């Protein structure tokens, strides 16, 4: 029997782990959703550590965590919609093992988005953020980059890794966080572990034999992409703070420049950067 390429073997292995499929919407204990709890660990709220934030009433700080979590999920819906469009076309051609795994990914990514939308509905909060609120350049790249290009799969890997790092943080710092928010992050992260492993294998395969200048150029490009993904998922826009009920103030600018927030984001994403550097990509971060 003819042997499969390494990434095709990985696709077959991951497909086995994706079976049987379990609907995440049906697995969450929705009755435990509470408006009177943080939906993110407080240390993960964008204004944590700023003196004015510490003086805000508990209800306002919790409301801010609600709006930031909603935006985080909505960014996931936006990103997964781009990936779903590309995967749907890719599942029609190519090696059978890859096609099968792409279909598993389609089912799992669609399940994530359904889970997020169910959360919005049950939370009783408008999700507000739409595709128009997110990075237009990343949207264009997601739609136009050739599916089999190294840059496309590098961008996919970052798009999975960057939000997953916050999922993992919630999972490890769940005390005091609404259990439904924790369950959602855990279920999302479990599937993403397989998607990330597949993306890493494809990228590793594509980089075999790549020259120093090619890796250098790709590392430079990924540094720019990483900053854009970090902004999308970790730095809310100004109008979010107003909707959360905070008093008037330059909150978005404060979060973007505050040392605690910058250190938090750098800490969350440092494993991602280390993994890319192990592949020979000199990513400039932070």
Image: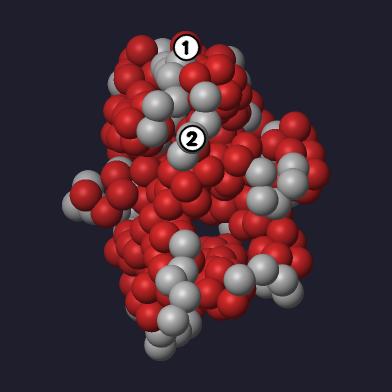
Element type at marker 2? loop
Q: Residue at x 80, y 44 (%)?
A: 144
> In the image, residue 21 lies at what x, y percent?
44, 84
- Circles 2 and 1, Cβ within 8 Å, touching? The answer is no
Q: Determine the residue positioned at 56% across, 34% down.
A: 229
The foreground one among 264 and 109 is 109
Tag 2 residue = 209
Other residues around mark 1 within 10 Å, as few (<14) / some (14–19) / many (≥20): few
105 vs 100: above or below: above
Percent of width and height locating residue 219: 51, 23
Image quadrant containing the C terminus: top left
> Relative to residue 278, is residue 126 drawn left or right?
right
Q: At numbered mark 1, what does the secondary structure look like: helix, strand or loop?
A: helix
Nearer the observer: mark 2 or 1; the answer is: 2
Q: Residues within 10 Å of mark 2 (few under 14, many from 20)?
A: few
- 88 versus 181 height, above or below: below
Q: Which residue is mark 1?
A: 257
Q: Residue at x 43, y 71 (%)?
A: 3
Closer to the camera in the image, 55 or 124: 124
Q: Percent from the top left, x then y, of residue 196?
A: 43, 53
**Residue 28 appears anywhere in the view:** no
């Amino acid at each position: 029997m003819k042997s499969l390429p390494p990434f095709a073997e990985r696709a077959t292995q991951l497909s086995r782990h994706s079976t049987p499929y379990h609907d995440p919407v049906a697995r969450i204990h929705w009755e435990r959703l509470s408006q009177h709890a943080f939906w993110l660990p407080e240390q993960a709220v964008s204004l944590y550590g700023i003196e004015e934030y510490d003086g805000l009433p508990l209800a306002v700080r919790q409301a801010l965590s609600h709006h930031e979590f909603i935006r985080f999920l909505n960014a996931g819906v936006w990103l997964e919609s781009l990936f779903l469009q590309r995967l749907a076309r890719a599942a029609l051609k190519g090696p059978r093992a890859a096609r099968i795994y792409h279909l598993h990914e389609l089912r799992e990514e669609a399940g994530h988005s359904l889970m997020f939308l169910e959360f919005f509905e049950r939370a009783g909060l408008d999700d507000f953020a739409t595709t128009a609120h997110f990075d237009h350049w990343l949207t264009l790249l997601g739609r136009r980059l050739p599916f089999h290009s190294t840059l496309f799969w590098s961008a996919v890997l970052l798009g999975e890794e960057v939000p997953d790092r916050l999922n993992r943080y919630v999972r490890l710092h769940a005390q005091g966080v609404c259990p439904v928010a924790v369950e959602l992050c855990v279920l999302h992260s479990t599937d993403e572990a397989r998607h990330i492993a597949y993306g890493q294998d494809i990228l590793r395969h594509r980089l075999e034999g790549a020259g120093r200048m090619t890796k250098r150029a790709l590392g430079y490009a990924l540094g720019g992409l990483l900053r854009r993904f970090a902004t999308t998922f970790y730095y809310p826009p100004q109008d979010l703070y107003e909707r959360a009920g905070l008093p008037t103030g330059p909150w978005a600018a404060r979060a973007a420049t505050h040392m605690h927030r910058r250190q938090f984001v750098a800490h969350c994403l440092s494993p991602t950067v280390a993994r890319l550097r192990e592949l020979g990509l000199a990513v400039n971060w932070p």
